[in-house]
Image (tube, rainbow, N blue to C red):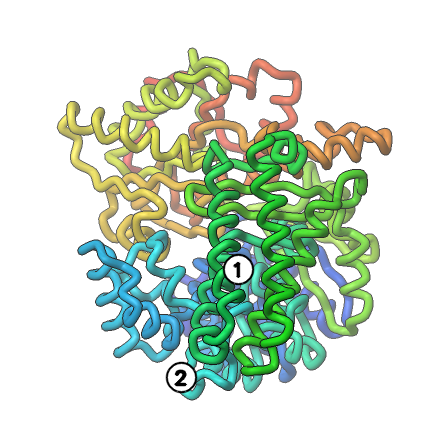
Amino acid sequence: MEEIFKLDGPLSKKISDYKYRSDQVDMASAIYESIESGEILVAEAGTGTGKTFAYLVPTFLHNRKSIISTGTKTLQDQLFNKDIPKIMHSLGVKRKVSLLKGRSNYVCHHFFHRTKEEGRFTSKEEIQILLEIEKYIGKTETGDRSNCENVPENSEVWDSVVSSRDNCLGSDCDFYNKCFVVKARSAALESDVVVVNHHLFFADILLRDVGLSELLPECESVVFDEAHLLPEVASIFFGDSLSTNQIIELIRDTRVEVSAQASDSKELSQVLDQLDSSVRGVIASCLTNNDNYAKSSFIRDESFSEAFENMMVLLKKFLEQMEPHKQRSDGLLNCYSRGLVHMEKLVLWNNLDKNLEFVSWTEAFKKSVHFNRTPLNVAKIFRNHLEVRSQAWIFISATLSIDNDFTHYIKQLGLEKAKTKNWKSPYNYSDNARLFLPRGLPDPNLPDYTEKVVDAAVPLIVASEGRTFFLFTSNRAMFKAEKIIREKMERLNFHSSILVQGYQPKSIILNRFTQEKNALLLGTMSFWEGVDVRGQSLSLVIIDRLPFGPPDDPVLQARIKKMKKEGLNPFLEYQLPKTILTLKQGSGRLIRDDNDRGVLMICDPRLVSKSYGKAIWRSLPPMTRSRDQEKIENFLRTKT
């Protein structure tokens, strides 16, 4: 490792602005040794350690297959398009590398053509989006929707032009030979290194959907970058989830099959209409949208309870009517099988009341309802998953420990056998960074809190000439702040692009932010981590409040109840550590290079008013602290 990373070594000769870091060499050596011995390593590397190269070099020095799993699709793209090519070029190695995402990230030829022929979208805007996607299909080699620049990532059109594990026709599809998912999977199976993301890793290993389950036994190492995300991701995929959209999609697909293969069954057509009506009745019974609820709160609602029971009765009737027809075609059999799985998930969700190992909860959206069943502790499940494999498992992040203690993280994933190591950030935080807590902010639970936060933030945004990440703990607060900021900036005649998460793909927003050099970016949790903006484009990071989990989150409520029953203190042993690690991630967006300067503004009076505030302060990088707004504004105006 020393030979590779030294100042006149292969990396320094091929990478511009290369800097030697002794901790990076030490980290790379530790990872190399773990891969050699097939160990589990939990490694925390502070910002600037160079963790990406520290795990890529050992990975590419081995000849066998490796899987690299990242926290976000944005980081996945960066790794595949930028970092890995640099390492391969520097080391002079030739390895076949592929990028693999979940199937919903690839345009599906079949569903695109079906959507276009059905004329499902009628508004001018939606038709234009469909035309843009059609142009993209004609020129793309990968079909990756993140590269379709002219279509917003949150457009509802996407849902109709991608496939799911449920409705994919597989080799029976007329477009199978053109399928972007099939091409991506084939490339992955033939590759030495496959870059995935955590959601795909767990979904695919459990569901055997895209091909990782075939790759994993051959791998020598699995590296999890941004590994702090794994406990939450694992809890999602070790549970169950079913949405009303999936049932409506099943109804739609069954109608197509019935029309072609079982048009003589009037009873089947009638039950499809009845089931469709009952599903929409469930959606309509949810009076509040865009929120999460425990199952108990829904069942107590008489209108929802009746609508849910009606849907269950009609889903059972659907299966009974489908039984005699399922062998008429592969399509009908597929629909029948999907119906059985849907019924099984709903029964489990509905019967889960007293089992403290799982919690049933519901997400209500404007046009859909999601029924979720989540394990409250994934340690045993995850530990068993690792122990049946013989390869090395490497867990890497900038935020895995609290005061150098990895206990919280290790307990969550059952990694008691792991080796742990950490390396501090080499950056000069005391000179180059300021930590600012404004005075006079109200309690975060008051209704005018976001307005007050924006009032406090705008003078600093102006002093910084834009160049700001404004990070929020909720979409609701972000969009509320956007409206206020636009009005204030217009009155101040302050010209700066305001980029808001959700209006464009994240990669496009980040490119614009970096190129314009005076933009203001508003984002939620996906921008708190895995985002690397260096230089003068970013000088101010504002966090609207401490990222405690919402108290009405049903999973959090159930976890707190379980911990109390076990005699534990959920606030000190779970909620506070989780908040500290999340805040460390957000603060890590500010200083990304030796020469970066900037201000981290945390808008939450609890940092000084609550007894736990000191533990949070201590966990952050050693920035110079200040509550003097004038000094902070002057610091931002100083360019060097």
Looking at the image, residue 367 sits to the left or right of residue 342; the answer is: left
x, y percent for residue 524: 44, 41
- Determine whether the residue tagged by mark 2 lies in a helix, strand or loop: loop
Is the residue 258 above or below the residue 327 in the image?
above
45 or 329: nearer the eye?
A: 329
Q: Quadrant of the N terminus?
A: bottom right
Query: Is residue 531 in sight in this rendering?
Result: yes
Q: Mark 1 or mark 2, which is nearer to you?
A: 1
Q: Which three-letter amino acid code belongs to the residue tagged 2?
A: Phe
**Mark 1 / mark 2, whichever is N-terminal:** 2
x, y percent for residue 263: 46, 75
- Check residue 175 in the rendering and tell me which mark sits there, or answer none: 2
- Determine whether the residue tagged by mark 1 lies in a helix, strand or loop: helix
Q: Quadrant of the C terminus?
A: top left
Residue under the point 54% across and 82% down: 329
Q: Which residue is mark 1?
A: 271
Residue under the point 35% across and 57% down: 507
100 or 333: nearer the eye?
A: 333
